[in-house]
Image (cartoon, coloured by chain):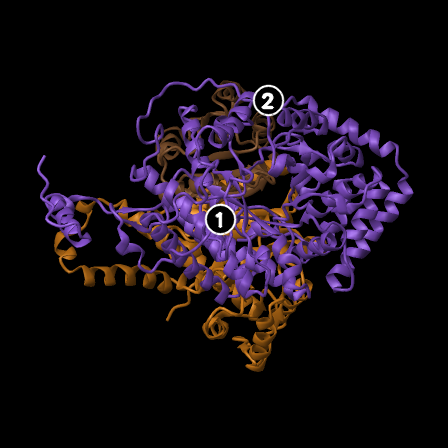
Chain colours: A brown, B orange, C purple
């Protein structure tokens, strides 16, 4: 599915100092024509509040200092509680591949390895935006 | 349910941004609930610290028990049409978990006139949500920003001293749109000098409805340190009250509704005309598109005036 | 084979060289370094006519190294970063690392301990925001008990504690000092390093104090150390943070040195004498896999810093030494084909050693996936030890000194870095760069340029844009048990139950007063923090009045 204006919220965990990957992705998505709300520090409720007020199509969370499972456990219900049941939720950063399946079971739609050549994330978003559900 | 209404409002704003016709019907329903919000425009050059200042204003207004809506506009990339909307990030601390604050980031999408129309409508949404103050934050001093500035009851022009000829560049902006000037990063030595110099200029705005003037106040603030913020809010409120002492405020509001009217009519006419099949037009008539268009529009406007329709006086 | 050489002269050989390459020379793509400096295919003595080839190691300006015989007298310090869970887990790790042969100069013990994010940010284990972060990417040390355990049994004179703190830099040192005192030893025996990295907010998205107060706190710690613990290194300049944020090696040099200069300026403005504190400043620098560029960077760095110190009024040569700890770049490691990283780490370490640095942390190959396992952490240490003992690299000081290429590249990098450095200084210095966000914008831009080069394939990264496979990496990284959270909370509760609450409240009130005094310029903060630590205040509790006093700031 394609959409003319895709709006993405990119956030990273509160007080995580690693911001390079998120910033790069924000720029890549902008250059792929998306509108990116960039958000440097967020606890789960702040991310969900921003997602609902901004009415985004995609929520992306960057994880560099672990805690991906806890975030997913909190974030998906927080989004659903706010009525965002068809937002696409992706994660990226330092996440071991063995965690991908457990994260998908928690409701994350897709995880991305760090440093991927540009376009991979944008392409995934373009293909999947609007079709996702938070079960 | 509060979160429900937030969700609805947020979705409606998306429809407004996308020019979805159905949004207009909802806006019409909201109109009776509008009119109580105080509209504040924040503008200034990039790097002036507008978002940080907005964050400070949010904190101050919340401490006074006033609810706040924020519309933060960032430019779209002219190449990709994508945008980085980074303002919200700097308001996080001020707004975290507070249901009395609603922040929405908008990309300019490259159509200044269209943007101003959309912002106008988004203001109505936040007004109808019951926000006591709606802040519209825009970058720069371009034509689009001027349009947006006209939406506000009070326009605050923010700038940081000490960057080359920032002060000189600002003076034109002050003359044109500012009701209140905020010199940000007041901890810098240059700030005091700039405040002195600007105060010495005695900028005024003329009340278009009465023979009186508003002296544009210059306030030194430090958004970072939360200094001068309460004073700034005081000045914004002073100006708001000042405009109510004559017909000035109704004039501002009339302008805003006129802009909305223009935007709607333009868009509706365009849609209406586009839906007419080409074959429905007389080929001979279209051969002179200038005359045809002139005749077409005059007909519509004149017919309305001639029949003494409400809202548009006959010439 | 026939020899056409008619003469042995350089000109004649150069002429022949030109003839031999004439057919294809214009087809060669001109090379460049990561920083964008041009690189030729061949360097000759003509390239170094302007270079100073008369330098000696251990002699100003120290381009060739800090010490006259390089690593021959004592090798570099192996300073592996570690820290996870509570102090109990980290303590076990400390002992393990000593067992594995990790040591500093002359066999000293060196513990480069990283705190977890809640500690760095300044919240205790029972704060709701700490959930999911406790002991995860660093050790959670917050109470007097934790610090007693940290130093238990270690000889203070021969043990170095480097503390990778965040905003809690001062409280952490106060807690350490109080623990030393409880053991009945004087502060003067303390050896180690406060990272004191406040200025990193110019490049990293980390909220911290307002710039003015950030610098005031740096200097407050410096003064306390000068008076109480003269062997303590009170400031580290975190160039690693600059390069990991996306700076090129030249930008890393320029911004890092400007950062250092901003500390010197702040110290001088506070009335300190140059020779009393400049010599105590040290650096942590990144290192990519671009071997020669990195070697040139370390050489240029020593030379430039020596000049800056001298210009600032330092007179003793020992106060002009750029003491450098290298942290091999984590950004260059890839999650794809994980084991490839061992090759990268070896190259990075090689560059650091050829560059003559004083101390090295080697990343583990699995850091692209998570926290290293015991085995990968040991292998990283062993990589250093192989270079140290098997490679012969240690025998000769500055082995690349005199290389036409490396000398020229050193000069080029120095010139390019001075250009940026001078611009920053002219615009008001590094602190102003924090306030305006200019440094961050410049680095973000080059980070994006580099990424676009990776995207286009112009900058090859094996496994990412070359030799890509789609096999799964089912690597199981080290996991920190979530039960650590309960354990940390229990330790905190237990500690609080045993202290005199009234004394703690009073001491924290004094901290609040001292914060104001520091802002007014009428007093210092460190003594009040040490008092609070003595009374039993925790890391998180000391941070409350500090946050109230010194604000919240993010460089835009």
> Residue drawn 50% across and 55% down?
C59
- The outermost residue toward the front is C7
Q: CA distance from mark 2 to mark 1?
A: 40 Å
Q: In this rendering, would A7 be left or right of A63? A: left
For label 1, the SS is loop
Of B224 and B60, the residue lying toward us: B224
Please report, as a chain letter, where disc 2 is located. C
Quarter of the figure with residue B216: bottom right
Answer above or below: position of C327 versus C232.
above
Question: Are the residues tagged 2 and 1 within 8 Å (C-beta)?
Answer: no
In the displayed structure image, the side of residue C171 where residue B72 appears, left or right:
left
Q: Chain of mark 1?
A: C
Q: Residue at x 51, y 51 (%)?
A: C58
Q: Residues within 10 Å of mark 1 (few under 14, many from 20)?
A: many
Return the mark for residue C479: 2
Count of labels in the image = 2
Query: Label 2: how many residues lie within 10 Å, few (<14), some (14-19) or many (20+)?
Result: few
Q: Image quadrant for the N terminus of chain C?
A: top left
Q: Which label is found at residue C65?
A: 1
Q: Which mark is residue A70?
A: none
Q: Earlier in the sequence, mark 2 or mark 1?
A: 1
Looking at the picture, tell me which residue is in the foreground, C377 or C511: C377
Q: Are marks 2 and 1 on the same chain?
A: yes
Residue at 45% x, 26% y is: A110
């Amino acid at each position: 599915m394609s959409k003319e204006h895709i709006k993405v919220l990119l956030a990273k965990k509160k007080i995580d100092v690693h911001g390079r990957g998120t910033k790069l992705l924000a720029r890549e998505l902008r250059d792929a024509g998306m509108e990116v709300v960039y958000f440097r520090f967020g606890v789960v409720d702040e991310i969900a509040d921003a997602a609902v007020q901004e009415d985004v199509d995609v929520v992306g969370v960057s994880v560099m200092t672990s805690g991906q499972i806890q975030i997913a456990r909190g974030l998906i219900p927080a989004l659903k509680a706010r009525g965002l049941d068809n937002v696409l939720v992706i994660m990226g950063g330092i996440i071991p591949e063995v965690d991908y399946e457990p994260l998908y079971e928690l409701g994350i739609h897709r995880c991305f390895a760090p440093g991927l050549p540009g376009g991979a994330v944008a392409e995934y978003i373009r293909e999947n935006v609007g079709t996702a559900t938070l079960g | 349910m509060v979160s429900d209404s937030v969700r609805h409002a947020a979705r409606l704003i998306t429809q407004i941004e996308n020019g979805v016709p159905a949004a207009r019907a909802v806006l019409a329903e909201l109109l009776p609930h509008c009119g109580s919000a105080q509209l504040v425009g924040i503008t200034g050059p990039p790097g002036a610290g507008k978002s940080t200042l907005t964050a400070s204003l949010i904190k101050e207004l919340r401490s006074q028990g006033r609810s706040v809506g924020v519309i933060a506009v960032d430019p779209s990339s002219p190449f990709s049409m994508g945008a980085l909307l980074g303002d919200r990030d700097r308001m996080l601390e001020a707004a975290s978990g507070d249901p009395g604050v609603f922040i929405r980031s908008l990309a300019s999408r490259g159509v200044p006139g269209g943007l101003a129309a959309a912002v106008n409508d988004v203001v109505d949404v936040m007004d109808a949500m019951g926000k006591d103050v709606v802040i519209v934050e825009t970058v720069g001093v371009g034509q689009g920003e001027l349009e947006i500035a006209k939406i506000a009851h009070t326009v605050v022009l923010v700038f940081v001293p000490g960057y080359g000829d920032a002060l000189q560049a600002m003076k034109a902006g002050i003359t044109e749109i500012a009701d209140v000037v905020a010199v940000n990063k007041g901890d810098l030595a240059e700030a005091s000098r700039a405040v002195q110099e600007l105060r010495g200029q005695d900028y005024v705005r003329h009340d278009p409805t009465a023979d009186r003037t508003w002296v544009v106040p210059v306030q030194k603030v430090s958004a970072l340190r939360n200094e001068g913020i309460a004073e700034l809010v005081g000045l914004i409120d002073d100006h708001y009250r000042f405009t109510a002492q004559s017909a000035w405020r109704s004039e501002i509001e009339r302008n805003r509704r006129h802009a909305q009217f223009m935007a709607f009519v333009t868009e509706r006419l365009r849609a209406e005309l586009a839906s007419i099949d080409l074959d429905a037009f007389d080929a001979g008539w279209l051969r002179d598109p200038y005359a045809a268009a002139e005749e077409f529009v005059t007909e519509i406007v004149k017919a309305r005036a001639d029949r003494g329709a409400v809202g548009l006086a006959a010439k | 084979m026939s020899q056409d050489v008619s003469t042995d002269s350089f000109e004649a050989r150069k002429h022949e060289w030109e003839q031999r390459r004439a057919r294809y020379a214009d087809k060669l793509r001109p090379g460049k370094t990561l920083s964008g400096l041009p690189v030729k295919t061949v360097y000759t003595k003509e390239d170094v006519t302007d270079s100073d080839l008369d330098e000696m190691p251990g002699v100003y300006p120290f381009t060739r190294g800090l010490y006259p015989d390089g690593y021959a007298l004592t090798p570099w310090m192996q300073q592996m970063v570690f820290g996870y869970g509570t102090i109990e887990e980290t303590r076990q790790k400390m002992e393990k690392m000593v067992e594995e042969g990790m040591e500093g100069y002359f066999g000293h013990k060196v513990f480069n301990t990283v705190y977890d994010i809640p500690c760095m940010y300044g919240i205790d284990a029972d704060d709701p925001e700490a959930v999911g972060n406790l002991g995860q990417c660093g050790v959670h040390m917050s109470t007097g008990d934790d610090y007693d355990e940290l130093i238990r049994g270690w000889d203070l004179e021969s043990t170095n504690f480097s503390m990778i703190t965040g905003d809690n830099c001062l409280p952490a040192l106060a807690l350490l000092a109080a623990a030393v005192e409880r053991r009945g030893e004087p502060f003067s025996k303390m050896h180690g390093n406060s990272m004191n990295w406040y200025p990193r907010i110019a490049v990293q998205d980390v909220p911290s104090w307002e710039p003015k107060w950030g610098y005031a706190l740096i200097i407050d710690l410096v003064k306390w150390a000068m008076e109480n613990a003269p062997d303590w290194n009170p400031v580290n300049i975190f160039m690693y943070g600059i390069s990991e944020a996306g700076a090129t090696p030249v930008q890393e040099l320029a911004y890092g040195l400007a950062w250092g200069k901003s500390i010197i300026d702040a110290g001088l403005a506070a009335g300190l004498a140059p020779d009393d504190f400049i010599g105590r400043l040290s650096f942590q620098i990144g290192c990519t896999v671009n071997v020669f560029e990195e070697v040139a960077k370390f050489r240029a760095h020593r030379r430039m810093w020596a000049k800056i110190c001298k210009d600032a009024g330092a007179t003793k040569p020992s106060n002009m030494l750029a003491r450098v700890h290298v942290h091999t770049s984590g950004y260059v490691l890839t999650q794809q084909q994980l084991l490839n990283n061992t090759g990268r780490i070896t190259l990075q370490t090689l560059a650091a050693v050829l560059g003559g640095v004083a101390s090295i942390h080697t990343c583990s190959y699995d850091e692209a996936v998570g926290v290293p396992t015991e085995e990968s952490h040991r292998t990283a240490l062993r990589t250093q030890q192989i270079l140290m003992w098997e490679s012969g690299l240690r025998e000769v000081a500055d082995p690349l000194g005199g290389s036409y290429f490396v000398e020229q590249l050193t000069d080029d990098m120095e010139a390019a870095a001075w250009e940026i450095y001078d611009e920053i200084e002219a615009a008001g210095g590094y602190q102003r760069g924090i306030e305006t966000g200019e440094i961050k914008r410049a680095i973000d831009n080059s980070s994006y340029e580099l990424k676009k080069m990776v995207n286009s394939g112009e900058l090859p990264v094996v496994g990412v844009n070359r030799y890509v496979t789609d096999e799964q990496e089912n690597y199981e990284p080290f996991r920190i048990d979530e039960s650590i959270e309960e354990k940390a909370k229990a330790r905190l509760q237990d500690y609080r139950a045993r202290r005199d609450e009234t004394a703690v409240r009073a001491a924290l009130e004094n901290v609040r007063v001292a914060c104001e005094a520091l802002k007014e310029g009428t007093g210092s903060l460190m003594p009040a923090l040490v008092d609070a630590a003595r009374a039993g205040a925790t890391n998180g509790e000391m941070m409350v009045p500090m946050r109230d006093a010194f604000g919240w700031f993010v460089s835009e």
